[in-house]
Image (spheres, rainbow, N blue to C red):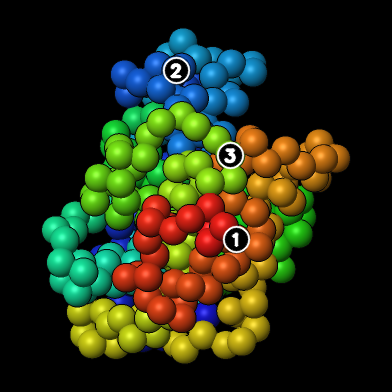
Amino acid sequence: MTFDPNADISRGRASKRGRNTGIAVGGGLGVLALVVISQLLGVNVTGLLGGGLDTGGGASSEDTSLEQCLTGEDANENVECRMKGAAASLEEYWEREAQELRFDYVAPQDLVMFDTATSTGCGSASAATGPFYCPPDQTIYLDVTFYDELRQRFGSSGGPLAEMYVVAHEWGHHVQNVLGILEQAQDGQTGPASNAVRVELQADCFAGAWAASAATVPDVNGVPFLRPISEAQYRDALSAAAAVGDDRIQQAAQGQVNPHTFTHGTSEQRVDWFRTGFEQGAGACDTFSVSAGQL
């Protein structure tokens, strides 16, 4: 999926944060809360509470607004501009979708791309943390080098839509936060039918719904942000969803699969729910009302 070169992406909520040389566990959450968030959102936000980093202080360098990212042409040529363009498209999509689904939508505070490590409202994060949404500061965090890892370590085919799928998935967590779903689902449980898995699969479904509609979402001048999705790009997005399934990650890391510890859903489930959103829209993304067998 490519951007219309003439699309205006300048209003996208995204910023770039430089390298941090001493990051603090902040935000008032503490280690236990970070463990809960890690289980709920299916990302490891606890792995770098120590590990040789300075967790005693320091601050992130000042955010920059990516003001050089103005058009769809910029988004097609630069991954950071592409993330800003995705943010612009997602914000417009969810504003429109909220009216259809009749809920009050509030945009995320920011999509922060960082270099190596940074401080967040959920504590310290690094490239090893992976992309994640932090509810306390309503911000999405991403080190874009994750996309290299997605291809090289997890076997995704890559591509622009695969990259934007990641942002759309995390944006889906923000929508869940707005709707109160994250708070209601937070029970610390894991397993094939756990709330943690249902949260992740719903975010995949939301990402699919955006992808299907993205070519119809216009900028302020009425120019669609993105051109229609190709079959190859669609396969790239499915490949990214499959790459981060619990079964595939556990098999690669441990040589075996333990469903009792699932927090993401299997590769097949993640693909299926992305496809559900793509084919049926966000209104079909209620992963909490279906049985375990239907997940």
Q: Which amino acid type corresponds to the residue marked 1 in the rendered image?
A: Gln
Q: Which amino acid type corresponds to the residue marked 3 in the rendered image?
A: Gly
Within the image, what quadrant is residue 218 found in?
bottom left
Q: Which amino acid type corresponds to the residue marked 2 in the rendered image?
A: Leu
- Mark before the other along the chain sequence, 2 or 3: 2
Left/right placement of residue 121 relative to residue 160 reads left
In the image, 111 versus 190, the foreground residue is 190
Query: Which residue is labeled 3 in the image?
Result: 191
- Circle 2 SS class: helix
Within the image, what quadrant is residue 100 found in?
bottom left
In the image, 75 versus 152, the foreground residue is 152
Query: Which residue is labeled 2 in the image?
Result: 32
- Mark before the other along the chain sequence, 2 or 1: 2
Could you tell me how far apart the alpha carbons at marks 2 and 1 are, in whole angstroms? 29 Å
- Mark before the other along the chain sequence, 1 or 3: 3
Picture layout, residue 191 above or below residue 278:
above
Picture layout, residue 9 above or below residue 178:
below
In the image, 161 versus 63, the foreground residue is 161
- Circle 3 SS class: loop
Query: Which residue is labeled 1 in the image?
Result: 269
